[in-house]
Image (cartoon, rainbow, N blue to C red):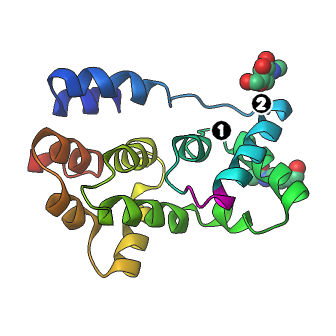
Amino acid sequence: MEENVAHHTSGDFRKLLVPFVSAFQYEGDEVNMTLAKTKGRTFHEKICDKAYSDDGLIQILATRSKSQLNATFNHYNNQFGDAITKCLTVPEKYYQKVLRLAINKLGTDERALTRVVVTRAEVDLQRIAEEYKRRNNMPLDRAITEDTSRDYEKMLLALMGHGDAC
Ligand SMILES: *[C@@H]1O[C@H](CO)[C@@H](O)[C@H](O)[C@H]1NC(C)=O
Ligand SMILES: *[C@@H]1O[C@H](CO)[C@@H](O)[C@H](O)[C@H]1NC(C)=O
């Protein structure tokens, strides 16, 4: 994915994005319980504040390690109830909501939009796009095209698998 991003972007925007994408390459089965507890608590706070597009929250959900994410949600469930279980089983519902809020926001919340597209690109972005279309009666790529421009639009579309549009 780093190569893909580097190929489709330029200048400052590339400088900003490439390290960001690299930072999400971690995968593994080991679980850090201390981290799971801290993140579970953060998750709870952000959900309570309805801060759905908060950086900290998206970063937790962008965790590549399923085991770590599972441990975080287990901790959350034990401590705060079971409301979040659906997030693990159907993350695309959560992400389509983050995208909808980001796109519908006046001026577009580019930070949230970038984070979701970049971090989910190789994970479940296609499913998120399907869920987005189902809920909003508009294809995600069209919503992005209408809301963004130039390099930024190209990069997002490339990550969605529309590389030939560049
Ligand atoms: C677990 O995560 C915490 C917080 O990031 C860190 O301080 C600690 O060193 C980690 N423990 C292990 C065993 O990796
Ligand atoms: C998640 O954690 C629970 C409790 O430790 C475990 O039973 C379950 O198998 C785990 N699921 C995954 C996908 O790791």
Q: Is residue 111 above or below residue 88?
A: above
Query: Within 8 Å of ligand 1, the CB of disc 2?
Result: yes
Main SS, magenta region, reads loop
Q: Position of residue 165 (x, y in %)?
A: 10, 50
Magenta segment: 47-51
Mark 2 and mark 1 in contact? Answer it, CB < 8 Å.
yes
Membership of 95 in magenta stretch: no
Q: Is residue 40 left or right of residue 12?
A: right
Residue drawn at the location 40% of the way across and 30% of the way down: 21
- Are there few (<14), some (14-19), or many (20+) residues within 10 Å of tag 2? few
Classify mark 2: helix, strand or loop.
loop
Residue 30 disc label: 2
Instruction: Assign ligand 1 to one image quadrant.
Output: top right
Residue occupying image coordinates x 15% and y 63% = 146
Q: Is mark 1 within 8 Å of ligand 2?
A: no
Which amino acid does the dot numbered 1 rest on? Ser
Tag 1, which secondary structure? loop
User: Could you give the CA–CA distance between mark 2 and mark 1, rounded to whole angstroms?
Assistant: 8 Å
Residue at 39% from the left image edge and 21% from the top image edge:
19
Residue 135 x %, y %:
41, 79
Q: Residue 125's image quarter?
A: bottom left
Q: Which residue is mark 1?
A: 65
Q: Quadrant of the C terminus?
A: top left
